[in-house]
Image (tube, grey):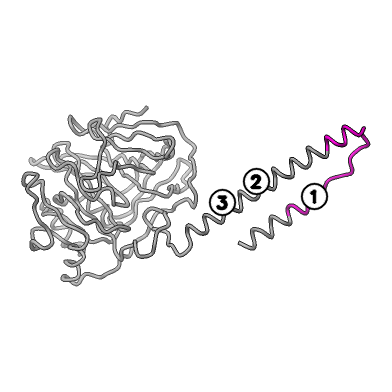
Amino acid sequence: MKKYIFLIMILLLFTGCSKSEPALKDDNSVEQSIIEEDNNKVVSENNIKDSIDNLDKKVNDREGKIKSPLTGLYIEKEQLNPRPIAVMIDNYYKARPQAGLSEADIIYEILAEGNITRYMAIIYSSKPSTIGPVRSARPYFISKALEYDPLYVHVGGSPQALKDVKALKMADIDALSCGKNTFWRKRHKPIPNNMYTSYEALIKEAHRRKYKANGNFKTLSFNEEDTDIEGQILKDIKFPYRKNYVSEFRYNDEEKLYYRYINNKPHRDEVTKIHLSAKNIIVQYTNTKVIDSKGRLDVNLIGKGKGFYITNGKIMKIIWKKGSRRDITRFYDLNENEIKLNPGITWYQIVPSNLKIIMN
């Protein structure tokens, strides 16, 4: 802090000493010149004071806090959990609204069978008392979950997904092999759209299974301050997966956030009632195809592809790259420079390359 004040004082000193002698003028001109100079000095000093006050506020706001690896936000140390949790969340219409999404750091939305999407919530800086409804695993969700070395939470899964969980030696917490103290069904929704859990219950189960306490993973880069991108203005974006499954984000200029809607209605958390929002939205186009009679999908998340980065009311084209299932997916501008995200919640919309997205 002292360094900033010292630099400001030096600037003021040189600014004051660098002025040349004024040319001779009549008394009125000289008096006016003095008034203007004094006014400019007051404005300059006020601007410097404001800068110092803002810097003080930022320092105080961040004092004793740590930067969350998944959001770039400064949080209290005790908020950060030892290991991320990746939870499969149901999005069948009978499962709505969902609990725990408002407390997630990152949310993925990807298609499952029948053009119905499913979510995966990455929870790292909160401890939700209610999470769900929890649903089954899919191989491509596993490819994303592996990027966080998480506790992977689900209820069963496709045959290939269950093989992958075992082969990849994931820290697996499957409701089908847990007791009622870890997962439970609620009567306000029908089976199978009513399986719930909590952070506390999952941690107890992880301890019982003797999974390592801490995660080991790489992260994306974040801007230290909120930063606008070079791109086109985007106030609204819709993902029309199918009837009754239209995801939408609408931009709020004052808050500089995108608020989420489902079928033209606010998407709210079941427990907190919070209207879900995102600071960052990443759209990732993928080659997607049906692979069996059940309608299961292959979503190719390895390699390279196109997409969009959306923040602060603007959208820009990007390129995504992922070398292997365990590698982190990184995102680049069209000049191959890795992008930085703004501090805040990120929603990933993983979509088929032929999905017709509506933008306004």
Badge 3 density bin: few <14, some 14–19, many ≥20, Cα 10 Å: few
x and y, in percent, of residue 70 in the image: 36, 55
Q: How many numbered tags mark residues here?
A: 3
Q: Which residue is mark 2?
A: 47
Q: Amino acid at mark 3?
A: Asn
N-term-proximal mark, 2 vs 1: 1
Q: Secondary structure at mark 2?
A: helix
**For the magenta stretch, what is the residue range?**
11-33
| Residue 23 falls within the magenta-colored stretch | yes
Q: Amino acid at mark 1?
A: Gly
Q: Which residue is mark 3?
A: 54
Residue at coordinates 8% horizontally, 41% vertically from top-left? 294
Real-space Cα distance between discs 2 and 1?
Answer: 16 Å
N-term-proximal mark, 1 vs 3: 1
Q: Which residue is mark 1?
A: 16
Residue at coordinates 16% horizontally, 56% vertically from top-left? 197
Quadrant in which the N terminus appears: bottom right
Real-space Cα distance between discs 1 and 3?
Answer: 24 Å
Instruction: Classify residue 127 by image quadrant.
Output: bottom left
x and y, in percent, of residue 346 in the image: 35, 47
The answer to whether the residue labelled 1 contacts the one labelled 3, judged by CB atoms less than 8 Å apart, is no
x and y, in percent, of residue 250 in the image: 34, 33
Quadrant in which the C terminus appears: top left
Instruction: Classify residue 28 by image quadrant.
Output: top right
Q: Amino acid at mark 2?
A: Asn
Residue 196 or 86: which is nearer the viewer?
Answer: 196
